[in-house]
Amino acid sequence: MLWILCLGFCGLLPHTQADPGALLRLGMDVMNQVQSAMDESHILEKMAAEAGKKRPGVKPIKGLTNLKVKDVKLPVIALSFIPGVGIFQCVSTGMTITGKSFMGGNMEIIVVLNITATNRLLQDEETGLPTFKSEGCEVILVSVKTNLPSNMLPKVVNKFLDSTLHKVLPDLMCPAIDAVLVYVNRKWANLNAAMPVGQMGTVKYVLTSIPTATASYIQVDFSPVVQQQEGNAIQLADAGEALEFPKDYATGSSQLLLSAAFLTAELALLQKSFDVTVRDRMIGELPPQTTKTLAGFIPEVAEAYPKPKPLVTQIRINKPPKVTMKMGKSLLLLHGTLEMLAARRRGRAPVSIFLLEAHFNLKVQYSVREDRLQMATSLDRLLSLSRVSSSIGTFNEKELTGFITDYLREAYIPVINDVLQVGLPLPDILDMNYNLAELDMVENALVLDLKLD
């Protein structure tokens, strides 16, 4: 909504060398929503109300007094891309102009007209935000009807109408285009704002380079800034290949593409939240979490702990989480340690039984809620277990594969999904509604196919 003239962003920002982590392609399906912007702003009605008021520097119209404008028709707006420039806009509307004529009677002029303009997007020097500006506004008369007596000389009538309308209409209608742009420019206010990812950091969408207008769409490249709460920026990994939109989307449609490298950087903000300590004795469908249960897989545990003791499990993710994408499938790769300890009474610290290095993958499903990308995970598979240390001597850690797999599925994955509920922020562009977007996983990226209804 309010995608009024998102133009060829010529001269917006100096070129930078950063690789984009997100791409936005705006097709005419989105641009045509400009109609709602003019409706919501009620600009034409406001301009009509102002028409009869005295304005500094504007001379009264000779031969017409008590000027008023009424019956403004709902505008019909047509847009077309201008490659390398932006968008050409044509607004078709109609209205009735009334007043006292030079003959002394009440006069009505019913006009149908087109307003045309080329619109550019520039960069505000103070805020650095995009700002829209119209150029070359013209008012073209389509038809004119009047209640002037039919016995008047046509040349006199035509001369009067021509003089009157050329004075009234440009001053009335061209400021309406500018006023709509002011209304829309306010919708850019949060574009470069830092958006929180829980309490762990922020994401800011920054333009990579000058956006490009083509005959079918406008493409905007972002180099998102992912920043930890303490101020350190997380660099996006080099994707190796340039990001590109898939070719199987309809011409003129709109998409947002988020790279796997960008999602990886965002999840790095949450890495500390992926560390958990579990003390629960009963977890889901798992058997009781005691040394007796563990001894069923590793007999050495029974020798060290003949009396069952509750287990404490600590999982620490010691490498940044990594997101991978392939056609139709996304994985979250986690690499860390899993330590099992025997609890002790009277507040004494638990004793480590063993420490394992673990590498496992989670399947990721994506969805959108409001302006956030949501992720939900399930266990794909446990890739490897290797013993780092043990207080019960050597044992075959592979015997624990089934036990650890079930533990991750029942005890750990729910924690991860709770953490991920914070959502990852999507770019705040002109009140875009992402809720209807269709999501596709492609090579190294997630694509949101933007829908309006």
Image (cartoon, grey):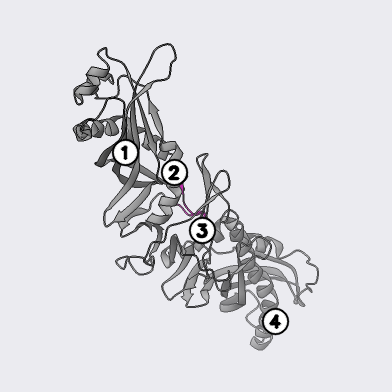
Residue 32 screen position, x and y as percent: 46, 65
Do the residues under discs 3 and 1 have CB atoms within 8 angstroms?
no
What residue type is disc 3 on?
A: Ser
Please rate how many residues cluster around mark 4, counting C-alpha atoms within 10 Å: few if below 14, some from 14 to 19, many from 20.
Answer: some
- Checking the image for residue 36, the label placed there is 3
Q: Look at mark 1 in the image and give the residue it sits on.
A: 357
Q: Give the spatial CA distance, label 1 vs label 2.
A: 29 Å
Q: Is residue 314 above or below residue 5?
A: above
Foreground: disc 3 or disc 1: 1
| Marked residue nearer the N-terminal end (3 or 1) | 3
Q: Give the spatial CA distance, label 4 vs label 3.
A: 33 Å
- Mark 1 secondary-structure assignment: strand
| Marked residue nearer the N-terminal end (1 or 4) | 4
Foreground: disc 2 or disc 3: 2
What residue type is disc 1 on?
A: Glu
Q: Residue at x 44, y 62 (%)?
A: 24
| Marked residue nearer the N-terminal end (4 or 2) | 4
- Mark 4 secondary-structure assignment: helix
- Mark 3 secondary-structure assignment: helix
| Marked residue nearer the N-terminal end (2 or 3) | 3
- Range covered by the magenta-colored residues: 424-434
